[in-house]
Image (cartoon, rainbow, N blue to C red):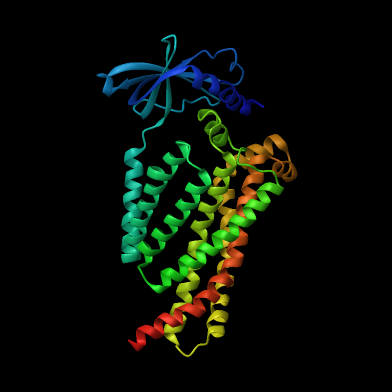
Amino acid sequence: MKKIIPLFFLILFLPFSLIFAQEELSYEGVVKEVKEIPCSEVFNEGYICFEYIVTIPKLNTEERTAPLFSETETSKFKEGDEVYITSVTDESGNEAWSITGYVRGSSMLTLLIIFSVIAILVGKRQGLGSLISLGLTLFILYAWAIPKILAGADIMVIGIMTVIFTLVIIMYVSHGFNRKSTVAVISTMIGILIVGIFAKIFTSLTHVDGSGSEEAFLLLSQTDGAIDLSGVFFISILIGAMGVLDDVVMSQVSSIQELYIANRELSTFQLYSKAMNIGRDHISSMVNTLFIAYAGSSFALVMLLTYNSGGIGNILKTDVIAEEVVRTLTSSIGILLIVPISSIIAAKLIPLGNNKSNSS
């Protein structure tokens, strides 16, 4: 129960803080001093409270005090740590400061550079293309789609347009303007349509609407209920599925192209059969990947739910887990069905393109 107290008070008081807060300013600072202080009555038992003196360079090295409670005997931040410190001023002019996290910009930039270099060294032109398509995808999401949705645009229209634009960019920029990319785009579109149909049906049957997570609650409260969470959840399923489907589809299409180049005497059925042998291996690994990836990313949440709820049956009753089960299973259905679909499309169309190029 003690573990739930911080989340409870965050959920209880956040809407009021959003209503009465007038100004919120965030700065980068350096922890100068750490002090252990008495806790308030609310967090008296089992908690140790700390007070941080933070120097803020942008405010001409002025110092600010930020309290923080903890369940451990050591403070989360130590002297010399670079942190973000935020000031919130209410209507009465009362100012409160809090540390919201570490400054991670330089470390994350270093990691991004390492990732980019490895992608280019290993992937060559395709690696560079994937980085460019990734940048364009992020631009579409954060510079166009999300602002449009927050401004009140129809989330289903914007979401579907985002999926289409992103898919086309990923395929053609990463793999070039060729028949293989076109076949992959067509096949992936079909896969996304399949996922969308199953997602629409089973979000209704299971009564999940995307409101089960803490992030959904915060989004709903900060936008005064203007955001359609069921639409957000549905589009998130499509975007997530697209990221897996394009991988599976391109692998199938590339396999068929290489098989045909190696032996141009292979018939459509032979190409399909050989590609399905490859695809079945891909199916088993990708379906497992979806479940394992979620289990790994949400391991702490599952442990918390197990600690408070008991067995697996009780965990599956929670909204947040039910949502992820629906998300994962609908995406997995899309993977299972798109392998034979993309294989037959590629087996039909890839030889046509190669025959034309040979005759010319």
In this picture, residue 349 sits left or right of residue 63 = right
Place residue 93 in its image quadrant.
Answer: top left
User: Which residue sits furthest left?
Assistant: 60
Q: Would residue 329 be visible to someone looking at this image?
A: no
* Residue at x 48% of width, y 62% of height: 246
* Residue at x 45% of width, y 83% of height: 260
Q: Quadrant of the C terminus?
A: bottom left
Q: Number of numbered discs present?
A: 0
Relative to 227, is 169 above or below? below
Q: Position of residue 11 (x, y in %)?
A: 58, 26
Place residue 143 in its image quadrant.
Answer: top left
Q: Position of residue 90 (x, y in %)?
A: 44, 14
* Residue at x 40% of width, y 26% of height: 78
* Residue at x 33% of width, y 55% of height: 116
Q: Would residue 11 be visible to someone looking at this image?
A: yes
Q: Position of residue 353 (x, y in %)?
A: 41, 80
User: Which residue sits furthest bottom?
Assistant: 265
Relative to 77, is 277 above or below? below
Place residue 320 in its image quadrant.
Answer: top right
Q: Position of residue 108 (x, y in %)?
A: 36, 43
Q: Quadrant of the N terminus?
A: top right
Q: Nearer the viewer, residue 197 or 245?
A: 197
